[in-house]
Image (cartoon, rainbow, N blue to C red):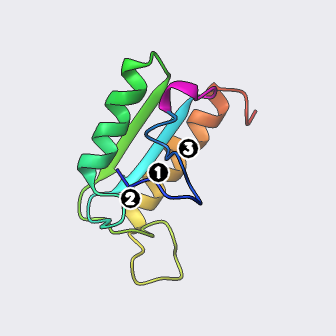
Amino acid sequence: MDPESAAMPKNAYDLAEEVKAPVLGLYGAEDAGIPPPQVEAMKEKLEAAGKTAKFKIYPGAPHGFFADYRQSYRPEAAQDAWAKMQAWFKKYGVLR
């Protein structure tokens, strides 16, 4: 995880036990900023804390795979992520 700094004394990994809402994480496997090992570590941390969390890592997808105006856009991953996000929001009462 990222080192602590004065601007951010704790990162998301440090705060996993304090999470109050269900977490859905949709990541590209080729995202250098949030590599799969960090995603897996966060998933494990949330699960160990008894939190509701689901993560999906899209093979071959870079950071920004959902942005249809960028070269990083991956239509199949974006469509799947959109469907998963809507289902998640409906399941937890964010969408009807």
| Element type at mark 1 | helix
The residue wearing badge 3 is 85
Tell which residue pokes out farthest to the top in this image: 50
Label 2 to label 3, Cα distance in Å?
Answer: 12 Å
Residue 51 x, y percent position in the rendering: 49, 21
| Cα distance between the residues tagged 1 and 3 | 6 Å
Callout 2–callout 3 Cβ contact below 8 Å: no
Q: Which residue type carries mark 1?
A: Ala
Name the image quarter holding residue 31: bottom left
Instruction: State the image coordinates of residue 67 (x, y, percent, origin top left).
Output: 52, 72
Label 2: how many Cα within 10 Å (few below 14, some 14–19, many 20+): many
On screen, 17 above or below 9? above
Q: Where is residue 10? Give x, y as percent.
A: 52, 45
Q: Residues within 10 Å of mark 1 (few under 14, many from 20)?
A: many
Q: Residue at x 39, y 68 (%)?
A: 63
In magenta, the rendered stretch is 16-21
Nearer to the camera, 7 or 22: 7
> Among all residues in the image, which is located at the extreme front?
6
Confirm whether the magenta stretch covers residue 18.
yes
**What is the quadrant of the C terminus in the image?**
top right
Residue 59 falls in image quadrant: bottom left
- Give the x, y percent position of residue 44: 32, 29
Residue picked out by circle 1: 81
The residue tagged 2 is 77
Left or right placement of residue 80 versus residue 35 in this view: right
The label on residue 47 is none
Amino acid bearing label 2 = Ala
Q: Earlier in the sequence, mark 2 or mark 3?
A: 2
